[in-house]
């Protein structure tokens, strides 16, 4: 997978790359709702680290969205399909459901009814996981096969930057400032106020352009099921079995298994750290306003720039070397958190740690999205993209839910915990080295090479 160098300014002048960035914001923002806001709300109510970590089990649903991904590829939502096409209609439908769950969770209290809060958080993550399938497929289908080598690394970079913008830079900063010391809104009020942000995201989706196929074949040609099937068995075969079988046939069993195992383990340490980072900052002595300023505003803004740098490195040196470098750098940056745990709340070290961490995380994210994009079929885009991201998310969500219990088991030894997260990337890098020969010689069969 060795993309050729491209002209930086020419690549970024493509309007579709701006769309990839803006739609990426919609993908990252729901993680504020079942992540940052819920974490700080539970901590303010006096719940334990273990409880805060375990509530993250709701994000396990991201690891299983491949099960209903064929539905997003095939089923046409009445009326919305006629207006916005296949994937944008699904994105808008999911965003409307997110507003409903935001309103519902704002009427609860984790101290009194943690189970109900967890169910609403599960609703948010389920809808968000469904939205991600539509967003990933929509982004890939904005580009032709011939543009994959040139455009996908940049689209992946801007999608990752958009995700970080939704999660930290805009959505996260706004949420923390509203619930912080300056504005002082309660966390239920924060959820209700963030509905306005979601409405703005819906407007962006509604104004985004159609995919290449939709532009050539306008979406206003009917609604309902996209394809007729003779019973559920044929539907299951055509929409689930065939897409997955095509992936394994095209890649070969060894390479396909290696790809999925690599994606499972690559960002596990980062996920463990990310789940507990807000708890760590507060325990270290930083206020909500300081976290919003340093982590969300400064760190999130830096991520956008770093994502573009990551894309440039990938187009210049290739995905394999990029992922090796990204994985090593990502693990090494976790050691700065261990240093923070030893020194206490030093703002300069906090800023340095965030800058390094955001650079390495953005770099690794661009590599991972580009890697998946090259191996996703153009015919079964949503389903296969969901399969690979689901495998990646299983390691990042289900296993990361135990991060709070690990910290408690270590007696609150944050430094040792962060060293452990740094070591977790080693198996993934060994798998990548094992696959490197196969990747260099592999052809996706649809215009992109490894």
Image (spheres, rainbow, N blue to C red):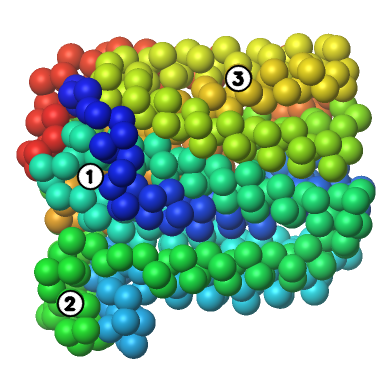
Q: Is residue 248 visible?
A: no
Q: Using a 10 Å C-alpha cutoff, classify the residue at mark 3 as few (fewer than 14 neighbours), some (14 to 19) or many (20 or more).
A: many
CA gap, disc 2 and disc 3: 45 Å
Q: Looking at the image, do the residues carrying marks 2 and 1 touch, with CB atoms under 8 Å apart?
A: no
Seen in the picture, residue 331 relative to 51 is either above or below; the reply is: above
Q: Is residue 132 left or right of residue 213?
A: right
Q: Indicate the position of residue 421 as horizontal and vertical percent values.
A: 61, 21
* Residue 363 spot, x, y in % from top left: 45, 26
Among the 4 quarters of the image, the one containing residue 269? top right
Q: Which element carries disc 2, helix, strand or loop?
A: loop
Q: Are marks 3 and 1 in contact (CB under 8 Å)?
A: no
Q: Residue at x 76, y 12 (%)?
A: 339
Q: From the image, which quarter does the N terminus lie in?
A: top left
Look at 66% across and 70% down and name the residue there. Answer: 195
- N-term mark: 2 or 3: 2
- Please state if 309 lies on the left or on the right of 226 as rendered: right
Foreground label between 2 and 1: 2
Name the residue that disc number 2 marks: 218
In the picture, the disc for residue 356 is 3
Question: How far apart are labels 3 and 1 at the CA level?
Answer: 31 Å
x, y percentage for residue 20? 38, 51
Query: Which residue was labeled with disc 1?
Result: 376
Q: Is residue 338 above or below residue 139?
A: above
Q: Position of residue 324 (x, y in %)?
A: 38, 15
**The C terminus lies in quadrant:** top left
Q: Secondary structure at mark 3?
A: helix
């Amino acid at each position: 997978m060795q993309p050729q160098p491209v002209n930086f300014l020419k690549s970024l002048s493509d309007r579709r790359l701006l769309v990839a960035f803006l739609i990426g914001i919609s993908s990252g923002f729901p993680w504020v709702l079942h992540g940052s806001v819920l974490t700080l709300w539970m901590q303010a109510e006096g719940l334990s680290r273990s409880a805060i970590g375990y509530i993250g089990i709701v994000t396990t649903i991201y690891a299983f969205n491949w099960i209903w991904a064929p539905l997003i590829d095939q089923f046409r939502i009445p009326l919305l399909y006629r207006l916005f096409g296949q994937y944008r209609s699904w994105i808008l439908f999911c965003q409307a459901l997110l507003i409903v769950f935001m309103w519902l969770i704002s009427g609860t209290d984790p101290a009194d009814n943690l189970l109900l809060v967890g169910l609403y958080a599960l609703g948010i993550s389920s809808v968000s996981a469904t939205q991600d399938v539509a967003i990933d497929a929509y982004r890939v289908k904005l580009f032709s096969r011939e543009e994959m080598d040139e455009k996908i690394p940049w689209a992946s970079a801007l999608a990752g930057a958009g995700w970080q913008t939704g999660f930290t830079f805009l959505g996260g900063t706004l949420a923390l400032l509203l619930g912080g010391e300056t504005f002082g809104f309660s966390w239920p009020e924060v959820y209700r106020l963030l509905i306005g942000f979601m409405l703005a995201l819906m407007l962006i989706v509604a104004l985004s352009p159609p995919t290449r196929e939709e532009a050539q074949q306008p979406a206003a040609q009917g609604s309902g099921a996209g394809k007729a099937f003779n019973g559920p068995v044929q539907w299951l075969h055509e929409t689930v079995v065939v897409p997955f079988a095509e992936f394994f046939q095209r890649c070969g069993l060894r390479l396909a298994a290696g790809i999925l195992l690599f994606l499972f383990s690559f960002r596990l340490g980062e996920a463990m750290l990310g789940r507990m980072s807000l708890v760590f900052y507060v325990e270290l002595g930083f206020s909500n306003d300081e976290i919003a300023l340093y982590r969300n505003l400064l760190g999130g803004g830096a991520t956008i720039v770093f994502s573009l740098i990551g894309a440039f490195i990938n187009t210049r040196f290739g995905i394999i070397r990029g992922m090796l470098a990204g994985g090593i750098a990502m693990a090494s940056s976790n050691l700065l958190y261990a240093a923070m745990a030893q020194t206490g709340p030093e703002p300069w070290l906090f800023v340095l740690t965030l800058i390094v961490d955001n650079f390495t995380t953005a770099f690794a994210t661009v590599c991972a999205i580009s890697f998946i994009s090259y191996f996703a079929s153009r015919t079964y885009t949503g389903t296969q993209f969901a399969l690979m991201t689901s495998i990646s998310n299983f390691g990042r969500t289900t296993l990361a839910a135990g991060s709070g219990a690990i910290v408690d088991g270590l007696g609150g030894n944050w430094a040792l915990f962060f060293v452990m997260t740094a070591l977790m990337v080693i198996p993934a890098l060994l798998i990548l080295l094992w696959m490197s020969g196969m990747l260099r010689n592999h052809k996706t069969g649809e215009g992109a090479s490894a």
